[in-house]
Amino acid sequence: MVATSHKKQDKELLNQLQSILLKEERVAIERLQETIDDPVILSEKIRPIIEERMLFFKENFPKEFKVTVDKMIEVKLKASQEEILDVIYPVMGKMIKKYVNHQIQMLKDSIDESIKKTFFSRGILWRLKNSLLGITVSDQVIHDLKDYQIEEIYVIQRNSGLLFGSASTENTIDQDVIAGMLTAIKSFVEDAFKREREDLEMIQYGTYKILLQNFYSYYIAIAISGSMSSTEREGLANELLGFAEEELNTLPAEPDQIFEKVSISLREKFIK
Amino acid sequence: MISRKVILTGSFGVGKTSLFRRFIKGTFSEKYITTIGVKVDKKVVEIRGEEVSILLWDIAGEVRQDKVPKSFFLGASAIIYVFDLTRPSTYKNIGVDMKILNDILPDAIIKVVGNKEDLILKEGTDNVIDIAALDKIKKEVAIHVDATTSAKTGDNVEQLFSNLAEEFIA
Ligand SMILES: Nc1nc2c(ncn2[C@@H]2O[C@H](COP(=O)(O)OP(=O)(O)O)[C@@H](O)[C@H]2O)c(=O)[nH]1
Ligand SMILES: [Mg+2]
């Protein structure tokens, strides 16, 4: 009995001792508990740490993750190379055109300048100037006589010759056969002359002209009747670049999937 | 409607152009017309209510020779490799040709077709096909033969293309 009461006493003493010695810790634990339980307080405490971490990330991201990100981008680019090129092509075309036009403008200005200074007969200079600008005298004359007319327009997948879309003034049947043959002729000519960097740009028979404008995974063929000046041709080429940029920047691998959509846009824009 | 490019290739005189004409127009002309380069035509095949537009390219010239522009083959969903059942020279190089075609078009369906089966006749008959002789020839070909056809009688021609169309929509 005595032993038990002693034990009890001991235990109480120990408890008292504990509560005295560990009082601070207990308070601390309680505070901690409160902090964890209350989201407002908790977030207040943690936010600075996260912010600091974020800052570190911001500053060190390139160093820490550059290799990984570069690899990711590289893989992504490879996978969607075709799509990216189809987006870039028309934009590049526009930029190049702009640059060339600028150069021509400068050339023109300098010619105009020299006209003022020299004694050459105006006839020769006029001709020279126009030929430098890519406008032939006959173009100039023809331009005043007659306008051209777009008879048919095709957007054709480069290799397969399958149609992404087409439109024409008349109800031409078998436009996909024409697209196929055009593609075959184009491949044949380009292969025969082995001009890898150069593409066939025009096929002509009689007064009928087929203009070909190449993009990355497709090309556009336009059948034209009547005569067309260099300036008009230039204008049409620009319209095509704009059309390509707006309507043809995301092309599916299977052309038939967007045939209706592209055909409608072609009709609205080019066949009035 | 789905559209697919299909190529006819194989040695000179095996009957590619005849098969092409038989399939597209349903006719056969005995008159030999040498194909220059390539001809493209179209036929719409209907499979269980779905239309499949087949753009068939009849390509002249041997695959092995460099005369045929490789770009003719690009973008094709299927290749029909035709040989002449009566002329071993038209299938002895089939292995080499298959490898070349596979390199150009790794994902395309390839059908190997023995044509002119109407000429493999039982002795003493003028229109009974000798099945045993046909099987013997098929065994001589290094690769599995998918079909034997006759552009002349039209036998198995329609079938060949509807099988292809079936695979396109599958
Ligand atoms: N008996 C028979 N002759 C055929 C058949 N297919 C083609 N020919 C003949 O074989 C020759 C070559 O045919 P062609 O289609 O021009 O061959 P290609 O060079 O592969 O296009 C022609 O004389 C055809 O009439 C066939 O199935 N049976
Ligand atoms: Mg032929």
Image (cartoon, coloured by chain):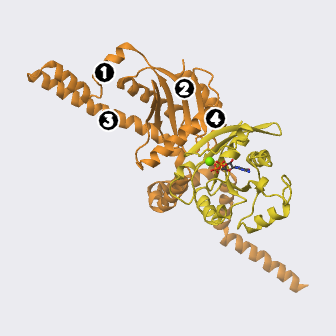
Chain colours: A orange, B yellow
Q: Position of residue A207 (x, y in %)?
A: 45, 23
What residue appears at the point 26 percent right and 33 percent down from the top-left corner?
A103
Of labels 4 and 3, earlier in sequence is 3
| Lateral position of residue A130 relative to residue B142, left or right | left
Q: Residue furthest front?
A: B124
Of labels 2 and 4, earlier in sequence is 2
> Pointer 1 and pointer 3: residues touching (CB < 8 Å)?
no
Callout 3 secondary element: helix
Residue type at mark 2: give it: Glu
Residue A145's image quarter? top left
Of labels 1 and 4, earlier in sequence is 1
Residue type at mark 3: give it: Tyr
Judge if badges 1 and 3 mark residues of a common chain: yes
The Cα atoms of the two marked residues, 2 and 3, are separated by: 30 Å
Is label 1 or label 2 in front? 1
Q: In this orientation, does residue B129 appear?
A: yes
Judge if badges 1 and 2 mark residues of a common chain: yes
Report in which chain the residue with disc 1 lies.
A
Residue B123's image quarter? bottom right
In the image, which disc is placed on residue A258? 4
The Cα atoms of the two marked residues, 2 and 4, are separated by: 18 Å
Residue A108's image quarter? top left
The residue where tag 1 is placed is A138
The residue where tag 2 is placed is A152
Report in which chain the residue with disc 3 lies.
A
The residue where tag 3 is placed is A99
> Pointer 2 and pointer 3: residues touching (CB < 8 Å)?
no
Callout 2 secondary element: strand
Up-down: is A88 above or below A61? above
| Lateral position of residue B66 relative to residue B121, left or right | left
Q: In this orientation, does residue B170 appear?
A: no
Q: Position of residue A78 (x, y in %)?
A: 53, 54
